């Protein structure tokens, strides 16, 4: 995300509640997108015939990134509900923190679509994992469950086979040992993507865990679209409101849109 984009340069004059929520959302968006790219990069190193070569550490890394995506999506779902409602509408006399109220949601409908698509399933998955201890008895008594950290199913292909013969492979991957006599290992349904372009060599990732399914590749695509919506539509509305306030109150229009700087600290220590 370029440093000039809204989520990387949130105006300091914006209401603190909104600014904190947006800063947290910005981090979570980067975490989700970065985690997905790491998953795909690692899976791309192994063709369908070499899946068994993925070692324990690599599998843990893959599933850690998957659950990071789920945790950060849960956080985004919570914070998106707060970005429309500032702590206060008007700024203090000695400190300009202007709450921007956005009532007109035209072109922002995707934010509500994202929440409707992912709130319930993400919240359920996150809560089941976070409260695993409470669910141990139920999981132990179940006749058939997914592996504890879920199973990952995805399409694996190479460009020659896919283009010339229409051949692709479906992989099911999990980490750790199986705990039950019978396990659920759901397989991605390729007909779901009929008529769509499939990315080579890895695409259409689906996690199955605790009786729920989440399409990881679609979550990545939708999160990327959400980032664009917040940067290009929501951010534009915020800046327009701030500029209007500045003009009405004879304030510096550049100063009101000024953002903060990120800094790192290095301490020099001597023993």
Image: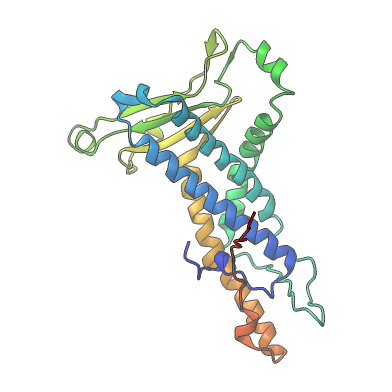
Q: Position of residue 97 (x, y in %)?
A: 74, 74
Q: Position of residue 151 (x, y in %)?
A: 50, 25
For the point 44% across and 31% down, which residue is it? 58
Q: Position of residue 200 (x, y in %)?
A: 30, 40
Say above or below: 106 vs 28: below
Q: Is residue 8 visible in this depiction of the protein?
A: yes
192 sits to left or right of 248: left
- For the residue pair 133 and 91, the one nearer the viewer reads as 133
Q: Residue furthest bottom?
A: 250
Quadrant hosting residue 6: bottom right
- For the residue pair 242 and 178, the one nearer the viewer reads as 178
- For the residue pair 205 and 175, the one nearer the viewer reads as 175
> How is the protein colored in the picture?
rainbow
For the point 58% across and 49% down, which residue is it? 114
**Position of the C terminus by quadrant:** bottom right
Q: Position of residue 187 (x, y in %)?
A: 44, 24
Q: Residue furthest top?
A: 181
For the point 19% across and 37% down, which residue is it? 160
48 sits to left or right of 248: left
């Amino acid at each position: 995300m370029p440093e000039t984009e809204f989520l990387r340069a949130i105006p300091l004059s914006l209401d603190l509640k909104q600014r904190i929520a947006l800063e947290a959302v910005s981090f979570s968006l980067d975490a989700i997108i970065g985690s997905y790219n790491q998953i795909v990069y690692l899976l791309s190193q192994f063709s369908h015939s070499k899946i068994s070569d993925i070692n324990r550490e690599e599998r843990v890394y893959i599933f850690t990134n998957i659950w990071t995506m789920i945790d950060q999506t849960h956080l985004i779902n919570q914070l998106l509900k707060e970005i429309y409602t500032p702590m206060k509408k008007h700024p203090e006399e000695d400190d300009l923190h202007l709450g921007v109220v956005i009532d007109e949601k035209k072109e922002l409908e995707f934010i509500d679509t994202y929440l409707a698509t992912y709130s319930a399933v993400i919240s359920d998955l996150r809560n089941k994992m976070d409260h695993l201890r409470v669910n141990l008895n139920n999981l132990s008594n179940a006749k058939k469950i997914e592996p504890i950290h879920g199973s990952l199913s995805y399409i694996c292909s190479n460009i020659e086979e896919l283009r010339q013969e229409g051949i692709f492979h479906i992989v099911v991957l999990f980490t750790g040992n199986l705990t039950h006599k019978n396990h659920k290992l759901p397989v991605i349904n390729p007909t779901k993507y009929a008529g769509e372009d499939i990315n080579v060599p890895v695409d259409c990732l689906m996690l199955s865990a605790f009786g729920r399914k989440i399409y990881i590749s679609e979550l990545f695509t939708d999160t990327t679209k959400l980032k664009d919506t917040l940067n290009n539509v929501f951010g534009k509305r915020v800046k327009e409101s701030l500029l209007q306030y500045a003009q009405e109150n004879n304030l510096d229009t550049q100063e009101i849109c000024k953002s903060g700087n990120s800094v790192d600290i290095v301490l020099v220590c001597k023993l």
